[in-house]
Image (spheres, rainbow, N blue to C red):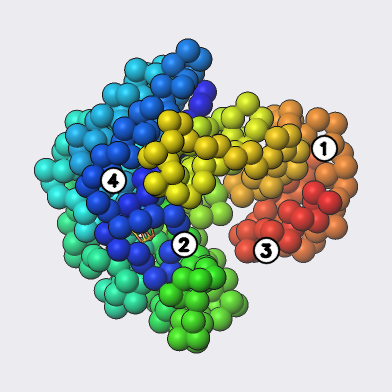
Amino acid sequence: MTGIYIHVPFCMRKCPYCDFYSIVYEKDIADAYVSALKRNFGRYKKDTIIIDTIYFGGGTPSLLTSEQILDIISSLRMNFVFAADIEITMEANPSSVDLNKLCEYRNAGVNRISFGVQSACNSELSALGRLHDFEQAKEVVIKANEAGFNNISCDLMIGTPRQTLESLLDSARELARLPINHISAYMLKIEEGTLFDCDWVRSNVAEEDDVCDMYEKLIYTLETAGFKQYEISNFSKINKKSRHNLKYWIGEDYLGFGPAAHSFYKGVRFYVPKDIYEFISNDFQEEIIEEENPCLADEYVMLSLRLNDGINFLKHTQLGGDSENLYQRARVFDGSGLVELSTEGIKLTTKGFLVSNGIISELIN
Ligand code: SF4
C-alpha cells in the first residue's frame, strides 16, 4: 500500500536551527495552497491507489484550520482508496493548538499527532527559539488525549546549546510521564546558513563524545520507561511505531505533495521544488526526478540498517543474490561491538548507530 506525505510549508516564524522549507503563514497563501494540493490529488483519480498512511509534515501543519485539513482529507478520499485502518498523522506545534482545535482535527479524521516539544527545560526551549514553554507543551499533550488522540508522539532534541546529560534525561522522563506512546529523539545538526551556524552555538553545544554518551543513556532511560527503540531516532510503546515513517525505511511507496515534498513511487525517487508560489500557480506540481533507477539493494542496506531489526537475509528479496557478499563485507566489523552479525542477518548495535554512515558506506561499496 502507498503512503501520502503532505508538506505544509508555513510557520509562525523561523526557528534559528531549522532548514526545512517554510514561509511565514498568510491566510490567502494557505487557501491557494490547499486548492493546489487538491488539483494535484486529482491526477491520481484513475489509478485506484490504496493508501494506508497520510502524514502532514512541515513547516507547521497545525497552522492550517480544521476546515482546511478536512478539505484536504476529503479530497484525498475522492481520489484515493483509504485502507480501513488508515493512519493519519499531523505534526503540531504546542503553541498553535488548543482543545477546540484538537477536537476539530480529530473529527476531521486525524488519528495520530506528533508534537514538536523538543525539551522539558525552558531555558533550552528559549535557546532553540521555540514559541512554547514546557508547561504549555504538557498541557496540549494532555488536551490532545482528552480530544480523543490515543496515538501521540513527541519530539526530543539531543545536543542543544547548554543541554547537559541530566537535563536531557530529565526531559526524557518528563515526556515519558505524559499520555504518549512514541518519542522521536533527533540530534541537533548545525545546518549551514541557519542562525545556529555561528561560533556561539558551536561553543555551547556538547562535544561529540559527550553527545554519544547522552544518546546511549537516553536509549536506556527511554527503554526503562517503556519506549522501545525501533529506529536510530525513534522509540515506541508496543504496536505504536509510526507506520508512515516505517515506509521510508522498508522501501514502500509514498507520494509527496506540496513544495519540498519527496516521493518514492514505482521505483523512482522524485521531489517538488521548494517554491510555494510556483506550487500555487502551476496547474500541477513540478516533479524533479532524483533517481530514475535507484539501486534497490544498496538502498535496502542503507535504510534497513537504521532499524533495530536490521537486515534479515531470509525475509528480504531486495538483496537478490547479494546477501553472501554483504555477509562477507560485514565480517570486517566482527568483534568491533558495532555490528551484530549472524547467518540470518545484520544489525547495528547502539554504538554502531552512532557511526552508521561509515558502516553503511563500507557495506555498500
Ligand atoms: S516550527 Fe518546525 S518547521 Fe517551523 S521553523 Fe521551527 S523547527 Fe522549522
* Residue sitting at x 54%, y 70%: 192
N-terminal label among 1 and 4:
4
| Label 1 near ligand 1 (CB < 8 Å) | no
N-terminal label among 3 and 4:
4
Q: Amino acid at mark 3?
A: Val
Q: CA distance from mark 3 to mark 4?
A: 42 Å
User: In the rendered image, is residue 302 in sight?
Assistant: yes
Q: Are marks 3 and 4 in contact (CB under 8 Å)?
A: no
| Label 2 near ligand 1 (CB < 8 Å) | yes
Residue identified by numbered label 1:
323
Residue identified by numbered label 4:
29
| 92 or 286, nearer to the observer | 286
Q: Answer left or right for 25 relative to 200.
A: left
Looking at the rendering, which quadrant does residue 352 occupy? bottom right
Query: Where does the image place residue 108, in percent across and percent down from the top left?
Result: 22, 30
Looking at the rendering, which quadrant does residue 162 occupy? bottom left
Label 3: few (<14), some or many (≥20) within 10 Å? Answer: few
| Secondary structure type for disc 3 | loop
Q: Tell me the tag on residue 355.
A: 3
Q: Amino acid at mark 2?
A: Asp
Q: CA distance from mark 2 to mark 3?
A: 23 Å
Q: Answer left or right for 276 relative to 35.
A: right
N-terminal label among 3 and 1:
1
Q: Answer left or right for 96 relative to 314.
A: left
Residue identified by numbered label 2:
19
